Image (spheres, helix red, strand yellow):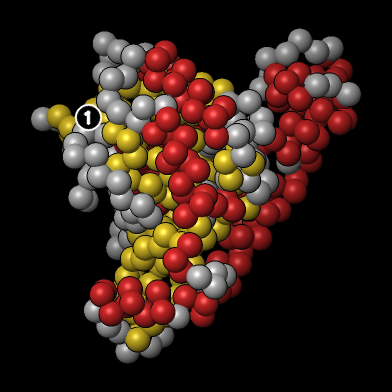
C-alpha cells in the first residue's frame, strides 16, 4: 500500500476517515480473536463546495464538519487514515529496468518529468509499488507510481490537525478499495476484478489482479450529474432532485414513473465513461478477461445501473459488500442499517483496515 505522507502518530490503533465531496464517513475496525470486527460507523453530510474534484476549497469548513462528526460519534481515537482522489492525486503505471527499490526511488525523483506531469519534485509527495516482472519483457518490471502536490496533501492534513486529529497514513481511494476487497473477497491468482466507486462528483475505477491494483483511473463525474439532470428536467432544487432520485420525495405518479423510467438516460454520461474506461483497459492490457465488476459508493445503488453495465460489457456486475468477512458489533451497530450503508462504507472500511507499518 502507498503512504503518500506518513505522519506516524505512535499508535497502532487507527480509524478510517473517508472524506468525500458530499459526506464524511468514520469507520473503526478492530482486530479480534475471531477476525476483524466493525466497531463503529458514523457519517455526516458535507455542504457542496467544500471539496471540488478532490481538491479542498474551504479548509475551515472541513475542520468544523470533522469536529462535528467525531463529537456526534463519540469516537475517542484521534489517529486516522484518510485518502485522496480526483485531481489531488495522480496514479500511473510505468515500466522500468529491473532494479532495487532505493535505486528506483532516486531514479523517479531525478527524472520525474519523464513519468509525472511535475517539473519540481520538491513540491511533490510520491510513493510507488513494484508490481512484478513485465509480462512482455523479463528484463523490466511494472511499477505503480502515486504522486500528489504537497500543497494539496497539506491542506487536508492541516484541516484535520485543526480538528484535533493526527494523520497516521494518507492513502488513495482506489487503494483503500483494494484493501477492502482483499480482506472480504475470495480470488484466484491472476484473476481480474474491476471496482467502480461512484461518488457524488468523482468516480474511481480500479482494476485488481490477484488482489493488487494494476490500473486506476478517476474521472470527475458521479451521482451529482444524475441529480442535476433530474433537477433540470423537473425544475427542482438540487436537494429535491436528490430526494426524487432516492425515491423519498412525494411526487405525482406520472412524474415518478417518468423519473424511474428515465434514470438510466439521466445517467448515460456516467455509464458511458465507466464503459469506456473498462474497454480502454481491456484493449491496452491485451484483451484482458475481467471476471466481475463490483460497484461501490453512493451511486452504486442507482436503480438499473448494475444490470445496464452487465448488458453493455457482458461482465457479471454486483454491488459491494465490505462486511462479507468482517463481523459487526451488534451492541453498537444495527446490521440492517449497515446493509443499507454498505456501498458508501467501502472506502472507509479499506482505510480502517490499514495498520501503521503494514
Q: Report helix, strand or loop for mark 1.
A: strand
- Looking at the picture, how far across and down is residue 319, in whole percent? 50, 38
Q: Is residue 179 rendered to the left or right of residue 148?
A: left
Q: Which residue is mark 1?
A: 30
Closer to us: 232 or 57: 57
From the viewer's perspective, is residue 148 above or below residue 173?
Answer: below
Q: Is residue 222 rendered to the left or right of residue 260?
A: left
- Looking at the picture, how far across and down is residue 62, in whole percent? 53, 30
From the viewer's perspective, is residue 122 above or below residue 255?
Answer: below
- Looking at the picture, how far across and down is residue 101, in whole percent? 26, 74
Closer to us: 264 or 246: 246
Q: Residues within 10 Å of mark 1 (few under 14, many from 20)?
A: some
Q: Is residue 19 rendered to the left or right of residue 191?
A: right
Residue in the image at 18% along x and 32% along y: 31
- Looking at the picture, how far across and down is residue 188, in whole percent? 30, 58
Residue 173 visible here: no
Q: Quadrant of residue 108?
A: bottom left
From the viewer's perspective, is residue 37 above or below residue 213?
Answer: above
Residue in the image at 38% along x and 55% along y: 4
Residue sitting at the far left:
33
Closer to us: 232 or 304: 232
Q: Quadrant of residue 27?
A: top left
Residue 2 visible here: yes
From the viewer's perspective, is residue 191 above or below residue 288?
Answer: above
Locate the N terminus by quadrant. Answer: bottom left
Residue in the image at 57% along x and 45% along y: 54
How many marks overall?
1
Residue in the image at 87% along x and 24% along y: 234
Amino acid at each position: 500500500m502507498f503512504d503518500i505522507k506518513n505522519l506516524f502518530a505512535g499508535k497502532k490503533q487507527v480509524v478510517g476517515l473517508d472524506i468525500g465531496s458530499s459526506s464524511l464517513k468514520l469507520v473503526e475496525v478492530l482486530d479480534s480473536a475471531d477476525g476483524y470486527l466493525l466497531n463503529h460507523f458514523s457519517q455526516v453530510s458535507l455542504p457542496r463546495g467544500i471539496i471540488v474534484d478532490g481538491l479542498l476549497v474551504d479548509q475551515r469548513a472541513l475542520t468544523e464538519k470533522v469536529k462535528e462528526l467525531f463529537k456526534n460519534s463519540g469516537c475517542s481515537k484521534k489517529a486516522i487514515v484518510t485518502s485522496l482522489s480526483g485531481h489531488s492525486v495522480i496514479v500511473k503505471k510505468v515500466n522500468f529496468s529491473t532494479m532495487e527499490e532505493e535505486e528506483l526511488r532516486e531514479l523517479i525523483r531525478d527524472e520525474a518529468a519523464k513519468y509525472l506531469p511535475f517539473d519540481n519534485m520538491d513540491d511533490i509527495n510520491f510513493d510507488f509499488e513494484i508490481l512484478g516482472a513485465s509480462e512482455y519483457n523479463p528484463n523490466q518490471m511494472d511499477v505503480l507510481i502515486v504522486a500528489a502536490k504537497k500543497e494539496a496533501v497539506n491542506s487536508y492534513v492541516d484541516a484535520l490537525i485543526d480538528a484535533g486529529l493526527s494523520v497516521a497514513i494518507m492513502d488513495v481511494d482506489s487503494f483503500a478499495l483494494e484493501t477492502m476487497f482483499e480482506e472480504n473477497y475470495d480470488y484466484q491468482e491472476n484473476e481480474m476484478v474491476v471496482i467502480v466507486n461512484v461518488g457524488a462528483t468523482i468516480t474511481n475505477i480500479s482494476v485488481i489482479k490477484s488482489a493488487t491494483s494494476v490500473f486506476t483511473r478517476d474521472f470527475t463525474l458521479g451521482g451529482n450529474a444524475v441529480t442535476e439532470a433530474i433537477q433540470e428536467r423537473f425544475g427542482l432544487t438540487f436537494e429535491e432532485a436528490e430526494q426524487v432520485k432516492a425515491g423519498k420525495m412525494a411526487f405525482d405518479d406520472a412524474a415518478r414513473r417518468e423519473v424511474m423510467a428515465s434514470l438510466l438516460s439521466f445517467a448515460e454520461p456516467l455509464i458511458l465513461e465507466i464503459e469506456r474506461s473498462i474497454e480502454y483497459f481491456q484493449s491496452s492490457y491485451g484483451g484482458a478477461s475481467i471476471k466481475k465488476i463490483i460497484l461501490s459508493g453512493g451511486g452504486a445503488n442507482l436503480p438499473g445501473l448494475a444490470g445496464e453495465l452487465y448488458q453493455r460489457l457482458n461482465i457479471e456486475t454486483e454491488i459491494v459488500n465490505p462486511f462479507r468477512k468482517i463481523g459487526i458489533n451488534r451492541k453498537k451497530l444495527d446490521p440492517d442499517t449497515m446493509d443499507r450503508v454498505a456501498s458508501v462504507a467501502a472506502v472507509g472500511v479499506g482505510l480502517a483496515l490499514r495498520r501503521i507499518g503494514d
